[in-house]
Image: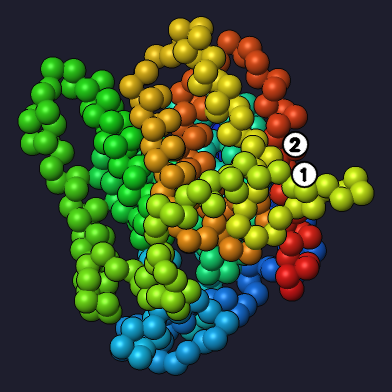
């Protein structure tokens, strides 16, 4: 009897380890390895504090009973309203940091950024698996999306300008994944969280609603729209609660439910056309495709307002190639979704270029990182499952990886 018990225990322990997805562990180790190398050059370790910690300061102020920061921090981008200083960025990252700051961990933002980076890679892997891209191939495409793109620039520390993009990237991937899996409540909730990091991600809602609709109809093919609403109306409750929290906070600070504070930055209040204007598009659109200048054979990579997205995020090339191929070969199984992704991506780029700046000082083209989750969905949707043309992705991935690794190191060493 004792021997049988011993064997059973041993078998159970083996079963436990068999349930662990080693591909996801490999993926996380790969992402961590790349970030580790970056940190050794820049010193931006996830447990280190830094000056650009607006979200931490905001959480501290909330805990002290204030909505403003109580003073000016001249090195931060702060909104000035009624002679008070406020964080000018959407508040969701401070929501996440609040409980940790309440416990006295005032440098938690770096570890949160690191966790968000790993989580983003994991959900990219899960999306790839949903579309039939399995095992090491799914690991590759998750790495292609992350360390092989300009995501690497914004993922390696928690500076206020970067952590919101990093979190939004992950939250959008989570929203897409749960929409695909017919979990409408989770999808819409994570999308609402993403909007609280990067407000323009509100543009992604048609894609999510379509995914939710398709997933629902797969399970209940005879349902009508009214049936879907009846069965899923409670799914919007978490999203509504999150949205209401933004509105209440915005109104309490700025007297408007849609004002996060960026319009009250001196940079925009002193500008003739404000934060957004169609007049900016003509100047900013070329930055999406701007190639480095060459001096004495050396490429001079821009360090302000962006450069060619096809260089810093070559996954855009793969996305375009596979999307066009799917139409030419008539292998596209969801033309409405493919067209919707294209239109949403174009609309997002137009909205970005209507902004006064294109990301300020940084390496690459970080604003366009916002559409990488949607582009990844489009790539997985049209990816050729027969393996044809797969090899084109390998050189593109290594171009993106090498360029962003070296460029990010050089940028931060020069900046610091």
Residue 100 falls left or right of residue 259: right
Residue depicted at x 60% and y 48%:
287
Element at label 2: helix
Which element is circle 1 on?
A: helix
Note whether residue 406 is visible: no
Q: Is residue 210 visible?
A: yes
Residue 262 at x, y percent in the picture: 40, 70
Position of 106 with respect to 88 (left or right) is: right
* Neighbours of disc 1 within 10 Å: few (<14), some (14-19), many (20+): some
x then y, percent, for residue 359: 55, 59
In the rendered image, residue 396, in percent from the top left (x then y), is placed at 71, 32
On-image quarter of the C terminus: bottom right
Q: CA distance from mark 1 to mark 2?
A: 6 Å
Residue receiving disc 1: 402
Q: Residue at x 46, y 23 (%)?
A: 381
- How many marks the image carries: the answer is 2
Q: Are marks 1 and 2 in contact (CB under 8 Å)?
A: yes
- The image shows residue 393, relative to residue 248, as above or below, that is above
Image spot of residue 177 (x, y percent): 40, 37
Residue at 36%, 89% (x, y): give it: 84
Is residue 272 depicted above or below 319 in this figure?
below
- Name the residue: 92% across, 49% down: 296
Nearer to the camera, 19 or 395: 395
Q: Residue furthest right?
A: 296
Residue 224: image quadrant is top left
User: Residue 146: which disc?
Assistant: none
Crowding near the residue tagged with mark 2, few <14, some 14–19, many ≥20 C-alpha atoms within 10 Å: some
Q: Which mark is residue 398?
A: 2
Q: Tell me, what colour scheme is on the image?
A: rainbow
Return the residue nearer the eye: 281 or 326: 281
**411, above or below 371, in the image:** below
């Amino acid at each position: 009897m004792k021997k049988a018990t011993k064997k059973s225990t041993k078998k159970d322990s083996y079963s436990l380890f068999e349930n662990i997805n080693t591909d996801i562990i490999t993926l996380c180790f790969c992402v961590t390895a790349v970030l580790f190398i970056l940190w050794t050059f820049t010193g931006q370790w996830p447990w280190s504090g830094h000056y650009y910690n607006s979200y931490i300061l905001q959480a501290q102020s909330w805990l002290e009973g204030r909505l403003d920061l109580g003073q000016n921090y001249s090195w931060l981008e702060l909104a000035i309203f009624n002679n008070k200083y406020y964080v000018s960025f959407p508040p969701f990252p401070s929501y996440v940091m609040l409980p940790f700051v309440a416990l006295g961990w005032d440098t938690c933002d770096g570890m949160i950024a690191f966790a968000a980076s790993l989580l983003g890679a994991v959900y990219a892997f899960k999306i790839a698996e949903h579309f039939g891209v399995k095992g090491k191939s799914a690991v590759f495409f998750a790495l292609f999306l992350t360390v092989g793109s300009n995501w690497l620039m914004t993922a390696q520390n928690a500076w206020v300008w970067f952590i919101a993009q990093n979190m939004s990237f992950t939250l959008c991937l989570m929203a897409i994944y749960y929409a695909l899996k017919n979990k409408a409540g989770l999808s819409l909730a994570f999308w609402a969280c993403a909007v609280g990091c990067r407000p323009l991600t509100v543009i992604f809602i048609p894609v999510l609603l379509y995914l939710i609709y398709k997933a629902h109809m797969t399970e209940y093919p005879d349902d009508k729209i009214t049936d879907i609403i009846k069965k899923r109306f409670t799914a919007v409750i978490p999203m509504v609660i999150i949205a209401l929290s933004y509105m209440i906070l915005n109104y309490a600070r700025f007297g408007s439910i849609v004002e996060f504070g960026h319009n009250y930055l001196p940079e925009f209040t002193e500008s003739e056309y404000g934060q957004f204007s169609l007049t900016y598009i003509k100047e900013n659109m070329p930055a999406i495709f701007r190639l480095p200048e060459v001096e004495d054979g050396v490429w001079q990579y821009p360090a302000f307002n962006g450069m060619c997205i096809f260089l810093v995020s070559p996954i855009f090339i793969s996305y375009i190639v596979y999307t066009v191929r799917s139409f030419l070969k008539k292998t596209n199984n969801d033309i409405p979704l493919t067209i919707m992704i294209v239109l949403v991506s174009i609309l997002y780029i137009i909205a970005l270029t209507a902004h006064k700046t294109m990301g300020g000082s940084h390496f690459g083209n970080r604003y366009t990182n916002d559409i990488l989750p949607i582009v990844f969905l489009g790539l997985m949707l049209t990816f050729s499952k027969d393996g044809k043309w797969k090899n084109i992705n390998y050189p593109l991935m290594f171009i993106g990886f090498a360029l962003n690794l070296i460029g990010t190191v050089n940028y931060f060493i020069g900046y610091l």
